[in-house]
Image: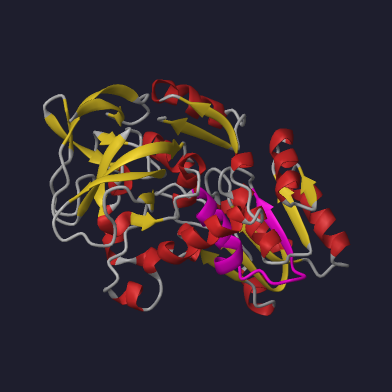
Amino acid sequence: MKLEAAVLWGLNEPWSVEEVELDGPSEGEVLIKLASSGLCHSDEHLVTGDIPIPFPVVGGHEGAGTVLEVGPNVSAVGPGDHVVLSFLPSCGRCKWCASGHTNLCDLGANIILGPQLDGTYRFHARGEGVGQMCLLGTFSPYTVVPAASVVKIDDDIPLRVASLVGCGVTTGFGSATNSAGVRPGDTVVVMGIGGVGANAVQGARCAGAQNIVALDPVPFKREKAEELGATHTAADFDEAWAIVSELTRGQLAEACIITTDVAEAAYIRQGLAMVGKKGRVVVTSVAHPEETKADMSLFELTMYEKEVRGALFGSSNAQVEIPRILNLYRQGQVKLDELVTTTYSLKDINQGYEDMRNGKNIRGMITYE
């Protein structure tokens, strides 16, 4: 079929909304009609080169919609099913899937290569094959994806907001509940309140944290953090440290979750300074690929048994966590509608990312219906 999609043709170029051709699903694939796509910061990383990927590529890796057609050997979903697309496919058979770490599935190596799992392209433009961000390409009203990337959801969940759970919400929520292991009564610092950090706040709240300190220089984002469950906010590190020290009588936080736009070396040092003995620093943000050094006190790391750990997709298993979070949304315990600051049409995608860079949105959303 012919349709319009947002294609990135090179580094630091704007998204080009143009006509593309989409093939039907091959073996193990699914054709989806999308209702919405989140404007996640990870697609901005394609533009800047912080996530390297061959060009051209249809962007977008947060989507929810309806199955229209399935290819051979697809049985888990069928036409008419409502689904969320997970940006990390899971085969269910590799070492990592078998041990319960589907976010680390070996298929994940394909998400920044461009073509589909069989090495061929489903999107075509200007006479050449066009890759798909994370095998998905949700900056298009229709897309073909691996069945391994599809999570079936209940029909009563609004597809307009369900797309957010395919990446940002689950990544942030799981960074608190899984990666940081937040427990009732803990003090937690969330560094950076964007699409991921806002949901780290929600995850910490749902896990029973007593104190949740949201650190962000943008007043609007600090206000949103309070709406989502933060007990305290701070504009910079010094202010946040003073709050945490007072709240804990000098013992400091159990966890600091780094969800800034880009992970910087100095943030590791700040995170370690924010936590006390046995404290955990979770690095969820993506760093510059060439960054190979972190700023930290190795003495303090040993003497206080502090930890620094990475978090991919909030250490979450998509087939479990996505329905779980959507059920919490149904019960009113997780806010999704409130995350969406502005909705855009596909043709306004560049404005959406400009608003994100300027700190105007917690989440921007493309809607197709």
- Residue displayed at 52% across by 51% down: 285
Q: Quadrant of residue 163?
A: top left
Residue 334, compared with residue 305, is above or below; it is above
Q: Is residue 199 above or below residue 45?
A: below
Residue 141 left/right relative to 165 = left
Please report the residue visible at 43 percent of the width from the left and 26 percent of the height from the top: 349
Taking 98 as reference, is 153 above or below it? above
**Quadrant assignment for the N terminus:** top left
Q: Is residue 63 visible?
A: yes
Residue 125: horizontal and vertical position, in percent? 18, 27
Q: Does residue 353 appear to the left or right of 192 in the view shown? A: left
Residue 169 drawn in magenta: yes
Is residue 88 left or right of 79 when viewed as pictured? Answer: right
Q: Which residues are magenta?
A: 168-191
Q: Quadrant of residue 54?
A: top left
Task: Name the residue nearer the viewer: 122 or 357.
Answer: 122
Which residue is nearer to you in this view: 256 or 182? 182
For image coordinates 39% across by 25% down, the residue present is 346
Was residue 216 drawn as part of the magenta stretch in this picture? no
Residue 168 position in % (x across, y down): 51, 49
- Left or right: 100 in relation to 233: left
Q: How many marks?
A: 0
Whether residue 311 is visible to the viewer of this picture, yes or no, is no
Residue 279: image location, x then y, percent:
68, 71
Q: Looking at the rendering, in which quadrant would you find the C terminus?
A: top left
Coloring applied to the structure: secondary structure
